[in-house]
Image (cartoon, grey):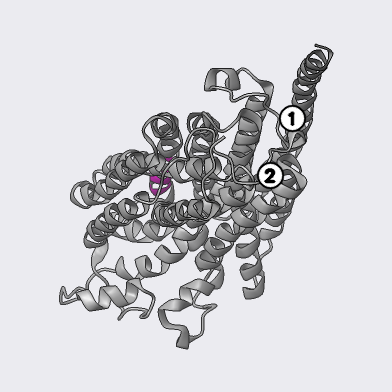
Amino acid sequence: MSHVSNPNRWTVIIGALMVQVILGTVYAFSVFVRPLQNEFGWDRTTTQWAFSIALATFALMMIPAGRLQDKIGPRKVATIGGVLLGLSFILGAVLINENRPWALYLCYGVLGGAGIGMGYVCPIAAAVKWFPDKKGLVSGLAVAGFGAGALFFAGPASELLLPPNETGEALGISQILLVGLGASKGVGFGMGWKAFFILHGIVCMIAVAIGASLLRNPPPGFKPKGWTPPPSRTVASSDMNWPEMLNTPLACMLWITFIFGATSGLMAIGQWKPMMGEILGEQSFAPEWMAGFGRFVEPVGILAIFNALGRIFWGKISDIIDRPRAMMMMFLAQGMAFMLLVSVESVFAIFLASAWVGLNFGGIFALFPSATSDYFGSKHFGINYGFIYTAYGVAGILGPVVGGVLFDATGQYILPFLFAGTLCFVAAACSVVVWGLSRAAMVETAIPKAEAESKTQAA
């Protein structure tokens, strides 16, 4: 086995966070909803299709991206992802208009989703390979930036997306920087969605390239100094490739559980800002003195903070109690939260709901990559998790679109949240099945090992 000084591996986590913060701005899609509806007269379902297509493309691209990063390393693949994501916004600024919603689907949905998929798998795969001793925790850390991306993005984007004032004056460079850094709430007008798309596209390309430069895979056979894998926590007797993995009931059940859990969360994420805006009206969580930093205590900001924290929290919990048990607890808690959301009215209740939903939704993206590595090994993790992650693509279609259709049909959020809560309870039941299958797999792999050891001793 190869040994590399353990502190060196933490630079990979730094790079992972930088990449994921930019990619995670996809979760702030709701900030685009009102500007696009106001400009083009589109309904909610029309805008939500863009979000769904982006998530589906993101998930599908994980398969070739995972295989590619296993072969050529995470640095190049993540950089390509940043370029594609940046181009999606730049081209969108040129092509999107009232008669071309398909341009939004093609640019933001297909091209942007492909860029996110190319970049997303690289930090997770690298982190899991460098930290086999802390899979849950580092998976959470590696994707925490993805959950926090909306936090850093939503507030400034909401201000910058405002149209120029009546005289056509837009924000200057200094004002853009102040708003972007959170030091100013803006001056009542912005730069318009087209100029913002171009600016954000350029930032995506540069920032992802910088973060990707810190990513690398460990040498073959690497394990942390002084660490011995605990046999009782490892299901796979060897690293499985994707055809072997897909032939197991455990992989199928893990995929189904992912669909139910992610669909429920995405029904809320895609509409969180307009929904909470309707409930709050003109009220704000943030006092005036917080200026631009007030976004950290607004509903979307709170959701994003706890989305990021949930990835670390549930990842660490799963290292202690195992993945399926953590999944079951998390989905039960989320289901109860969605059932209670139908009666949310007070400011405190909205604050609590935003935190609770974000915490549990974020945990999904720490538990499933860790479980994939536990059950099927880390050698082919990139492509293996790519296949498991296609469940998120299915959820990306079902969640936002069904949520949008139910809202357009009823004009209320009650039915979408009851449906989402029910899906969470189904996901919790599926987690129990995953637990049973993983225990059975442990027994199946333990028996051949014991027989081999017995023959060796006898010889």
Q: Quadrant of residue 67?
A: top left
Q: Foreground: 113 or 148?
A: 148
* Residue at the extreme front: 459
Q: Residue at horizontal 76%, vertical 27%?
A: 442
- In this rendering, the label closer to the viewer, 1 or 2: 1
In the rendered structure, which segment of residues is drawn in magenta?
A: 47-52
Q: Which residue is mark 1?
A: 438
Position of 109 relative to 89 (above/below): above
Residue under label 2, please give it: 424
Question: Mark 2 Cα within 10 Å, few/some/many (few <14, many 20+)?
Answer: many
Q: Secondary structure at mark 2?
A: helix
Amino acid type, callout 2 = Cys
User: Where in the figure is residue 286, as x and y percent of width and height?
Assistant: 51, 80
Q: Quadrant of the N terminus?
A: top right
Residue 222 shows in the view: yes
Q: Amino acid type of disc 1?
A: Ser
Q: Is residue 29 at least partly visible in the picture?
A: no
Q: Earlier in the sequence, mark 1 or mark 2?
A: 2
Q: Residue reaching furthest bottom?
A: 289
Q: Residue at x 61, y 56 (%)?
A: 312
Q: Is 216 situated left or right of 264 in this image?
A: left
Give the prevailing secondary structure in the magenta stretch: helix
Distance between the alpha carbons at the discs numbered 1 and 2: 21 Å
Q: Give left or right: position of 108 versus 424.
A: left
Residue 181 rendering spot, x and y as whole percentages: 36, 73
Residue 53, which numbered label? none
